[in-house]
Image (cartoon, rainbow, N blue to C red):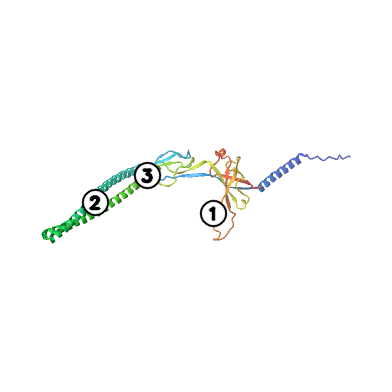
Amino acid sequence: MEQEQKQPKKKSPIRYVIIATIVIAAGIFGWTKISYAISHESTDDAQVETQISPVLPRVSGYVKIMDVKDYDSVKAGQLLVEIDDADLQAQLLQMQADYETAQADIVNAQAALKNAQVGLNTNHGDIKLSSIKIQQAEEDFERNQKLYADQAITKKQLDDSRFSLEQARQQSSNNQSELSTAQSRIAILQAGIAKAKAGLAAKAAAIQQQQLKISYTKVYAPQSGRLGKLNITAGQYVQAGSPLFQIVNDTTYWVVANFKETQIRKFYPGMPVEISLDAYPDSTLQGQVTSLSEATGARFAVLPPDNASGNFVKVTQRIPVKVNINNVARYSHILRAGLSADVSIKVN
């Protein structure tokens, strides 16, 4: 009996084509990843940053009006909060009354000074008159001395002329004392007026300061942006310097990427950067290196590590790198401060 020899089945070449295609694709993918890793430095320790300005009252008081709500958009210079200024206004009225009283006191002091100056002129006149009287009394006394020597007058007449001379001299001395007193009084009045004017200037400065405090009862937005969570309500008492809420600038964004110290040797400002946000992985943003920090992130910690104390464990440090985002206005609708990001910088 004749045995029929069976022909072996030919294997389909499609299987080999598929395997070869997979191998080639895997090779291309692997080579792409390897070449990208070789030519780029990357980190996932990066966050979106922006300017966040605290809104702080400069005076204490009760909140009278709240013109904003949580997460509102505001413009720079917009009125946000108004603090009750009734007490400050009452203090201002008292200060203004004191100022007017001080002005009246100065007018009175100036009038007294004018009277004293008039009296001083009278004193000068009295001194001149005393000098004339002394001269006359001296001449009379000398004449009477000669007449008495010639026995033309009596001893009493000579004594009377002597007494008149002494009286004139004493009156002149009294007038000199009155002149000194008047001059001292004028100096005191002038000093008092100068002091009153200084006090008036101090009261005017206090009024200006009080008016400035009253203007501080209206709290305006320091910059444009969006508000955060409000920490106050109308009627609440707030302290000067205590933060009410914060304004997040919604037009200026950048990224701070913390690279390992072993990655930054080829970094320089102006290098192109690719940015991928974790929240929007399908969007790739372009940017450029702006600057590198002069210190590691650990140096800015509240308690920076001190390798000279305790057991030393070497840890790779990270350097903050600031990256500006190109066409930031185009992506402002998706950018939020604090978002995590992946950053890659081409170094070769």
Distance of label 1 from label 2 (alpha carbons) = 81 Å
User: Who is closer to the viewer here, 55 or 118?
Assistant: 118
Q: Residue at x 58, y 52 (%)?
A: 318
Give amino acid for label 2.
His
Q: Which residue is mark 1?
A: 299
Q: Where residue 48 sits in the image (x, y, percent)? A: 55, 44
Q: Where residue 67 sits in the image (x, y, percent)? A: 43, 38
SS assignment at label 3: helix
SS assignment at label 1: helix
Q: Is residue 132 visible?
A: yes
Q: Is residue 235 left or right of residue 280?
A: left
User: Which label number is shown at residue 124?
Assistant: 2
Contact between marks 1 and 3 (CB within 8 A): the answer is no
- For label 2, count other residues whose C-alpha is less than 10 Å away and answer few (under 14), some (14-19) or many (20+): some
Task: Give above or below for 142 relative to 10.
Answer: below
Q: Which residue is mark 3?
A: 208
First of labels 1, 2 by sequence position:
2
Give amino acid for label 3.
Gln
First of labels 1, 3 by sequence position:
3
Task: Quarter of the image for the N terminus: give it.
Answer: top right
